[in-house]
Image (cartoon, rainbow, N blue to C red):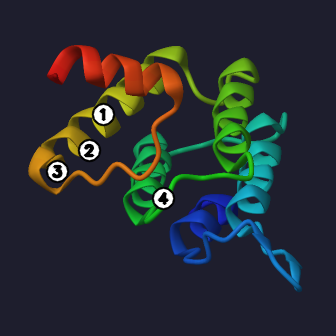
Amino acid sequence: MQVRSIQYLKLENDYRGFVTNKGWAHAIAHGSDFLRSSLSHTKFHLTNVSELFITLKKVINRLETPFIDEEESRLASAFKLGVQAENISVEDFIKGIQYIDKELWMQYDATKLKITYLDPYTTSLVNFLFK
């Protein structure tokens, strides 16, 4: 049986954070909190670690804009606590991150990259490297 917290994040399509005149939507952050509770629980046993990283890849692939309301730190916290609780082995964590890195770089196309915001350090670096 698939873990419901993983299934929730796999199916979630609402990536909004704070919605003006409505309040917090924040579904990815709340799903990450749910995942963190699952991965850090003493009675939790993950039978298919690859499913966890496939789900993380899906979350990242659906991003149309960067997270701006601390969703990424809450998602990272779930993995950190999963490793600390020994529900994810360090080896599986490293393999999972390498898998995501490889998969995402294979999809990368520099000609389609749209940079909408550069902090001062990045702007200086880009100017230094490319001008």
Crowd band around label 1 with a 10 angstrom C-alpha radius: few (<14), some (14–19), many (20+): few
Give the SS element for disc 2. helix
**Residue 101's disc number:** 1
Q: Are marks 4 and 1 in contact (CB under 8 Å)?
A: no
Q: Are marks 3 and 2 in contact (CB under 8 Å)?
A: yes
Separation of residues labelled 3 and 2 (CA atoms)? 5 Å
Decide if residue 1 is in sight here: no
Which corner quadrant holds the C terminus? top left
Nearer-the-camera pick, 13 or 67:
67
Q: Which residue is mark 3?
A: 107
Separation of residues labelled 2 and 1 (CA atoms)? 5 Å
Separation of residues labelled 4 and 1 (CA atoms)? 13 Å
Q: Residue at x 45, y 37 (%)?
A: 118
Tell which circle, 3 or 4, labels the residue nearer the N-terminal end. 4
Q: Which residue type does callout 4 highlight?
A: Val
Q: Are marks 2 and 1 in contact (CB under 8 Å)?
A: yes
Q: Residue at x 37, y 59 (%)?
A: 61
Crowd band around label 2 with a 10 angstrom C-alpha radius: few (<14), some (14–19), many (20+): few
Crowd band around label 3 with a 10 angstrom C-alpha radius: few (<14), some (14–19), many (20+): few
Residue extending farthest front? 131
Nearer-the-camera pick, 117 or 15:
117
Percent position (x, y) of residue 68? 66, 52
Q: Which residue is mark 2?
A: 104
Percent position (x, y) of residue 90? 53, 16
Nearer-the-camera pick, 57 or 23:
23
Q: Residue at x 67, y 66 (%)?
A: 4
Q: Which residue is mark 4?
A: 59
Tell which circle, 4 or 1, labels the residue nearer the N-terminal end. 4
